[in-house]
Amino acid sequence: EESLASIEGDVIPGELVFKLYDTYGFPADLTADVARERFMTIDERGFQECMEVQRKKAQQAGKFGADYNEQLKSEKSTDFKGYDTEHYTGTVIELFFEGQAVNVLEDGQEGIVVLDRTPF
């Protein structure tokens, strides 16, 4: 309601329709229904453009993750506990620096920490 009250004109911008969908899970078709009740329309094209940008970001993130995991060549896996709890104490089972398994990360080095279990 607050978002709609601030709109000038009779078209809900695609960026707002996308934000409602992406942030709050409010479907674009329901936003269009609400708009019609207020004699407004939604910017369908703008919404689709935002969706396409999001799709590309997701694809890139997916590619990064897949390539990244292949590069690590780790036989160890992490037990995901996020559905059960937000807090969990895990144990470091492997460290990586510049794609290679190491025993220690020195001060100033950025690496990857593999935990036995985690909530995220």
Image: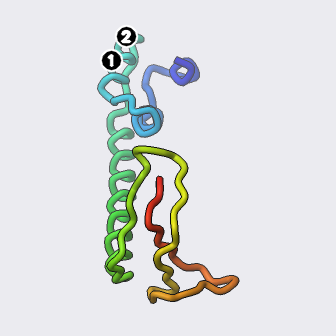
Q: Nearer the viewer, residue 40 or 89?
A: 89
- Whether residue 79 is situated above or below residue 104 in the rendered picture: above
Q: Please identify the quarter of the rendering in which residue 38 is found.
A: top left
The amino acid beneath tag 2 is Glu
Residue 83 position, x and y percent, is 40, 45
The amino acid beneath tag 1 is Asp
Q: Residues within 10 Å of mark 2 (few under 14, many from 20)?
A: few
Spatial CA span between label 1 and label 2: 6 Å
| Residue pointed to by mark 2 | 37
Q: Residues within 10 Å of mark 1 (few under 14, many from 20)?
A: some
Q: Please identify the quarter of the rendering in which residue 8 is found.
A: top right
| Residue pointed to by mark 1 | 33
Q: Residue placed at 54% from the left, 49% from the top?
A: 87
Under tag 2, what secondary structure?
helix
Q: Residue placed at 52% from the left, 68% from the top?
A: 91
Left or right of 87, for residue 25: left
Q: Nearer the viewer, residue 39 or 99?
A: 99
